[in-house]
Amino acid sequence: MAKKRFFTWFFIILLLSVPLFAGGCGQPKTTAPEQEGKGAGKTYQPVELNFATWQPPQYTNNTEVFIPFAEEVAEKTEERVKIYLHPGGVLAKGDETYDAVVTGMIDMGFSLQSYTPGRFPLSTILEFPFMFSSSLQACQAAAELYKTNPVFQQEFLMKLLMRR
């Protein structure tokens, strides 16, 4: 049951945070990796990204998803990319996270579409009461909508393009 709950939360987080993560990845301060030959031996400053969430530090998303994600990014990039998690709403509260990413106040953030009314109108269908019997079912429906519906995809794509 715990494993099912973890995967349910993981997919919900993944679906709902795609615009925020992707928007945060478009920062112009990204540095190029080291190259062999011309420019070899040149050192680069690590890219440091601030990731904000309104959830408390001990919350499962932080301890089991966001922190391991940041650690894996650092490992895979050989410490060239570092993600610093700021939980508890210290950089942006839940309803401020989207705007904080768009304006560049933070690089990445976790929020929910329901915290930004009117900005993701198509995805509000997923929030209707009594529409799903479980969060897993809602997550699967959202993933299927995103995979198969170009209009639903466009809603998120427009938010990413506006960020750049």
Image (tube, rainbow, N blue to C red):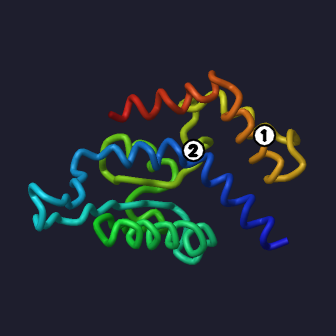
Q: Residue at x 29, y 46 (%)?
A: 27
Secondary structure found at label 1 = helix
Rendered image quadrant of residue 48: bottom left
Q: Are marks 2 and 1 in contact (CB under 8 Å)?
A: no
Rendered image quadrant of residue 64: bottom right
Say few, some or many: other residues with alpha carbon within 10 Å of mark 2 (under 14 / 14 to 19 / 20 or more). some
Q: Residue at x 74, y 32 (%)?
A: 125
Q: In the drawing, does residue 155 fall left or right of residue 43?
A: right
Foreground pick, 1 / 42: 42
| Figure check: 98 above or below 88 | above
Residue at label 2?
115
Instruction: Inspect the image, locate mark 2, and give the three-letter code of the amino acid beneath it.
Output: Tyr
**Which is in the foreground here, disc 2 or disc 1?**
1
- In the rendered image, the quadrant that contains the N terminus is bottom right
Sequence-wise first label, 2 or 1: 2
Q: In the drawing, does residue 67 fall left or right of residue 102?
A: right
Instruction: Inspect the image, locate mark 1, and give the three-letter code of the amino acid beneath it.
Output: Ala
Across and down, in percent, residue 106 comes to: 34, 53
Q: In the drawing, does residue 77 fall left or right of residue 3?
A: left
Across and down, in percent, residue 45 comes to: 17, 65
| Figure check: 40 above or below 139 | below
Secondary structure found at label 2 = helix
Across and down, in percent, residue 107 comes to: 35, 53
- In the rendered image, the quadrant that contains the C terminus is top left
Indicate which disc residue 89 carries. Answer: none
Residue at label 1?
141
